[in-house]
Amino acid sequence: MSVYLIRHGKTEANEKRLYCGSTDLPLSETGRAELRAMRYAIHPQRFLTSGRKRTDETLQILFGDVPYAVDARFREVDFGSFEMKSYDQLKEDPAYQAWLTGDNEANVPPGGESGTQMTRRVLEAFQEIPDGTALITHGGVIAAIMAHLFPAEGKHRYQWQPQNGRGYEISGNSYQPIP
């Protein structure tokens, strides 16, 4: 059996390179079109999303009108006051520079959560996922799971983050990219 981790399709925030974690955005027109062009050769037995518009819409486009569960613990990291802003908008902000400096995983953005906090909640929830489940979630969530499960790969979180609409099939102690 396998567990499938699939990143939601593109949003306007992805296209504009904005920090977007807790903001509940739908897919962009480009995101919808790209997902409609994808063909998955996987057949999950059950489906789970983070409950965000972008994950629920991705599920519907890729797999149709299927029953699914929602677990908000699989939502993206909350970027707090940096939400929906770009690097260029934030680069002169002392709070942003402080967040970027040092241990970026442990640093907490104002009003948000750290990568470490997000990883903790995600890994707790991931332990409860039964085999045969497709989890439609966020890039940071997938990266946190993959970095935890496959530390021997030596990849950091951002190297594990799949492109929108893509992901990984995890089977036992191995994985392969999908689709």
Image (cartoon, rainbow, N blue to C red):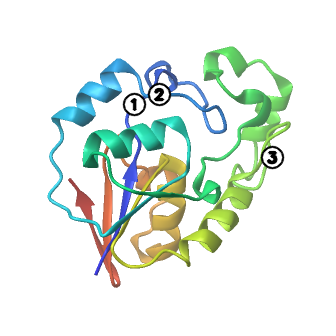
Q: Quadrant of the N terminus?
A: bottom left
Along the line of sight, the residue nearer the viewer: 30 or 103: 30
Residue at disc 3, secondary structure: loop
Instruction: Tell me, yes or no, whether the two marked residues, 1 and 2, touch with CB atoms within 8 Å.
Output: yes
- Amino acid at the residue labelled 1: Lys
In x, y percent, where is residue 71? Answer: 59, 59
Q: Nearer the viewer, mark 2 or mark 3?
A: 2
Q: Earlier in the sequence, mark 2 or mark 3?
A: 2
Give the left or right position of residue 132, taking residue 113 as reference: left
Q: Residue at x 55, y 41 (%)?
A: 52
- Amino acid at the residue labelled 3: Val
CA gap between label 1 and label 2 equals 6 Å
Within 10 Å of disc 2 (Cα), the crowding (few <14, some 14-19, many 20+) is some
CA gap between label 2 and label 3 equals 22 Å
Give the left or right position of residue 126, taking residue 99 as reference: left
In x, y percent, where is residue 96? Answer: 77, 30
Q: Earlier in the sequence, mark 1 or mark 3?
A: 1
Residue lying at the far bottom in this picture: please name it.
172
Give the left or right position of residue 141, taking residue 93 as reference: left
Within 10 Å of disc 3 (Cα), the crowding (few <14, some 14-19, many 20+) is many
Give the residue pinned by disc 2: 14
**141 is higher (above) or lower (below) than 95:** below
Give the residue pinned by disc 1: 10
Give the residue pinned by disc 3: 108
Within 10 Å of disc 1 (Cα), the crowding (few <14, some 14-19, many 20+) is many
In x, y percent, where is residue 2? Answer: 31, 76
